[in-house]
Amino acid sequence: MSLTSRTLFFLIFLASSCSIGRYSGPVGSFHGLLPCADCPGIAATLTLNADHTCIVEQRYMDRELQPTVIQATFTYSRSGRILLSEPILGMTNLQVAGETLVFVDEAGQKIETNFPERYILSREVPEEVHFDGSEEIFFRATGNEPFWMVEISPSGKIHFQTLGPEEMNVSFPMVNQEPSEPGVYAMYSGASDDGHIEILARVSDCSDDMSGEERTNSVKVNFQLTNQEKPQAYSGCGNYQSPYDLHDVWELVSMNNQPIERKENSQAPYLILNALNSTMTGTGGCNRINATFLLRGKTLTFGPCISTKMACPNLDQEQAFISAISEQTLKIKMDDNLTLFQGNSSMTFRRKR
């Protein structure tokens, strides 16, 4: 064999050898909204590259604005199976099915579930459920069986969404909010041509029955579309979201580290902070008080504090309290309690139950 023939034979052999390991499966991004035990869904995106690298993105729809991004690799078999080096929702096996990727178990069988459509990634990006981040969340509640979520924005928009056989994704303008006696419950209602919704947020320690997460309100939702004969009821747990988690009834515990004294037939001072309309009502211990406030990050600025003029015991303490909040800008510290401070002066409150 001549040198030229041997060279040609070697080049043909080299080309054919390289083609054996060449990736011939799908490339590009595939998207899905996967089931979640304690949230309305997990937005997932898997991007496959021809060099057997991939990017896994996951975002919890009710608690994250930005996804968690993981760099990974994958293998691909002739049968169309993809095996990821990093899991998506605990799963690493997918089967190529046309222009979709279907999650399967290690034996290649489809996942047994009541939501089979939620275990498919497709080229099309699913409709977003969460607010787009241009608007903050004032109150959020979720529940299970079926998975549902309700969010109230500071502007008064109520967003309700469910997963399951009868998916819903609707928004209503708020038409009313009704606070109860301090520390009991709040009712929010919304309505439009599409239907109406009522949300009862009762002040009560509430544990999510799947995740075990502890929240501050037990929540009941009554929801009805215009074309439905009767309302549908949902139960779950909710929280006021930071920085609006100061939306509550706060009883004064101490001023400048000195415990609050309670005279006979009197009560401790408390504030009812309504973060939705930026108003404060309450008592100095005897007289009723009210004011407006401005919340900016971790500072709270009260307007002039107006009070009734009854003569009561312990007025010195009440006047000191009113002076400490009226037309004052105070820094906020939130943990189990609420602390408002300015320089060396401080007031500590606990939730009134």
Image (tube, grey):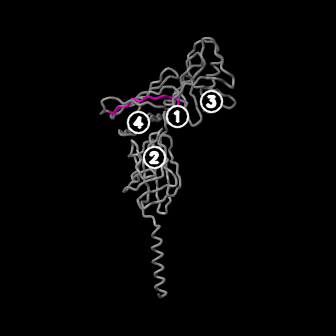
152 relative to 24, above or below: above
Cβ–Cβ under 8 Å for marks 1 and 2: no
Q: Which of 176 and 16 is in front in this view?
A: 16
Query: Residue 340's mark?
Result: 3
Which residue: 37% across, 55% down?
Answer: 97
The residue to which callout 4 is attached is: 146
- Sequence-wise, the earlier of marks 1 and 3 is 1
Kind of residue at badge 3: Leu
Kind of residue at badge 4: Pro
Q: What element carries label 1?
A: loop
197 with respect to 336 (left or right): left
Q: How crowded is mark 3: few (under 14 residues within 10 Å), some or many (20 or more)?
A: many
Kind of residue at badge 2: Ala
- Give me the C-alpha separation between circle 4 and circle 1: 17 Å
- Give me the C-alpha separation between circle 1 and circle 3: 31 Å
- Sequence-wise, the earlier of marks 3 and 2 is 2
Q: Which of 139 and 117 is in front in this view?
A: 117
Q: Is mark 4 on a helix, strand or loop?
A: loop
Q: Where is residue 25 in the image (x, y as percent from the top left)?
A: 42, 61
Magenta segment main secondary structure? strand
Kind of residue at badge 1: Gly
Cβ–Cβ under 8 Å for marks 1 and 3: no
- Sequence-wise, the earlier of marks 4 and 3 is 4
**Which region shows up in magenta?**
212-225
Q: Where is residue 279 in the image (x, y as percent from the top left)?
A: 52, 27
- Give me the C-alpha separation between circle 4 and circle 2: 18 Å
- Sequence-wise, the earlier of marks 4 and 2 is 2
Q: How crowded is mark 1: few (under 14 residues within 10 Å), some or many (20 or more)?
A: few
The residue to which callout 1 is attached is: 212
Q: What element carries label 3?
A: strand
- Sequence-wise, the earlier of marks 4 and 1 is 4
The residue to which callout 2 is attached is: 43
